[in-house]
Image (tube, rainbow, N blue to C red):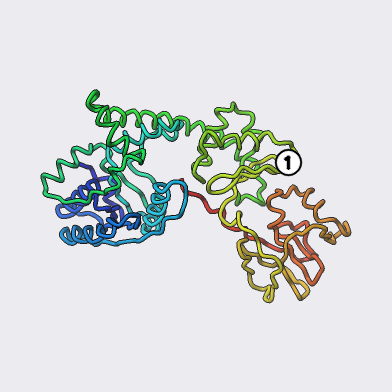
Amino acid sequence: MIDLTPWLSAPAWHIAFSGGLDSTVLLHLLADHARTHATPPLHAIHIHHGLQPAADTWPEHCKAVCERLGIKLTIIRVQIAPGASLEQAARNARYSAFQESLSSGDVLFTGQHRDDQAETLLFRLLRGAGLRGLTAMPVQRPLGQGILARPLLNVSRAQLHNYAQAHGLSWIEDPSNTDTAFARNFLRGEVFPLLQQRWPQASQNLARSAEHLGEALGLLDELAQADLAVAGEGAPAIWSSLDSLDLATLAALSPARQRNALQYWLSLRTRLPDSRHWAGWADLRDAAIDAQPVWQLTDGKLARSHGRIWWLSGDWLQPVADGLRWEQPTSPLPLPGNGSVSLQGSTPGDLRIAYRRGGEVLDVPGRGKRDLKRLLNELQVPHFMRGRLPLLYSGERLLAVANLPELGWADCQLHWQPPTNAQGLS
């Protein structure tokens, strides 16, 4: 029924085992394959969301199934973050737990099948999704240190049901699956039966359409990569650890091509905005040359400064703590939420790290005392970075500005390792 050859060299196999029909059949297939072939160690993971009373009995069911098959089971309880979409919050919690369970190269198998593929396409069409949202679920994709694999995508729900009955399998029926207040359940329970009465191959044809759309997206991704290769040039070497793009290069493209390039770039860093929120890009792009616009996105933000757009996430979104004493300048000093600094050269005592408040003056060798704001303007330091740029003081005297050797005191240089620009869910 399935081909597991692509994943035989993995260090370990894991299966997302909910106890429902799909994952039960998949677990049985994997266990059967492991009995007759050389395969990686197999391990089941059950995520307990605790969203309904019936779910409290599911871990025991899953445990009993795994014991009969001789498969190790891990049960992980997750907390669901409050939000507008309970389904999305549960999915985020589930996949976060899966990701943390995978070691390098491990494979996580999930039970999505051909009908899921078709339902996803129709659901997203009804929501007005673009091409990126309409493409087929891939057979595999990266997940944390490992891979998420979907070996059942060419198998129908009816085939899974027939297999389960033929092998005497028992599975959990989630009561929420019959609640047609959920859009997917309405499609599955009310819409697809009607479609298949009139077009028996509806699910198969829709799934095939999703594959065709995936091919089209692949071509657009190639175009985006070419555009981004040009837009990525010219980044200041001193700030190369931050992802940025040249604004003029992007703005010279057609609007549709701009969106295509940005969708590809952003999809690697955050959940994409829907069509209503793409006005944020126009506002960022078209703001006055001396403005400092920001486009807030789900997992970070885009800031514009000195002709480039910069992606900021993770610690870059957190405030910094001011006024840190540096008791041992021979060792690096961690900066809460802002990386760390180290010192090269000799300095006076009574050292501390602070951040800009305005009005700072620096004694620059050969130039005398200069206003720090003007100096940062001369060096084209991005606006969003100026409030995070560590300043080295001896008492009340400003000695050096991190990573800017032009703004150092004698032989004293302050080196800053900026915070991690953590990537969002893709």
Give 156 or 224, whichever is nearer the viewer. 156
Looking at the picture, does residue 110 appear above or below residue 340? above
Q: Is residue 274 left or right of residue 195?
A: right
Give 79 or 417, whichever is nearer the viewer. 79
Q: Residues within 10 Å of mark 1 (few under 14, many from 20)?
A: few
The quadrant where residue 160 appears: top left
How far across and down, in percent of the image, does residue 40 sit? 25, 56
How far across and down, in percent of the image, does residue 27 sit? 22, 51
How far across and down, in percent of the image, does residue 294 sit? 65, 44
The quadrant where residue 277 appears: top right
Which quadrant is home to the N terminus?
A: top left
Looking at the picture, does residue 78 appear above or below residue 86? below
| Residue type of the residue flagged with mark 1 | Ala
How far across and down, in percent of the image, does residue 406 sit? 78, 56
From this viewpoint, which residue is outermost toward the top?
Answer: 198
Give 41 or 167, whichever is nearer the viewer. 167
Q: Judging from the image, what secondary structure is the residue with disc 1 in? A: loop
- What residue is drawn where x is 74% and y is 58%? 405
- What residue is drawn where x is 63% and y is 65%? 335
- What residue is drawn where x is 20% and y is 51%? 171
Q: How many marks?
A: 1
The quadrant where residue 2 appears: top left
Mark 1 sits on what residue?
Answer: 291
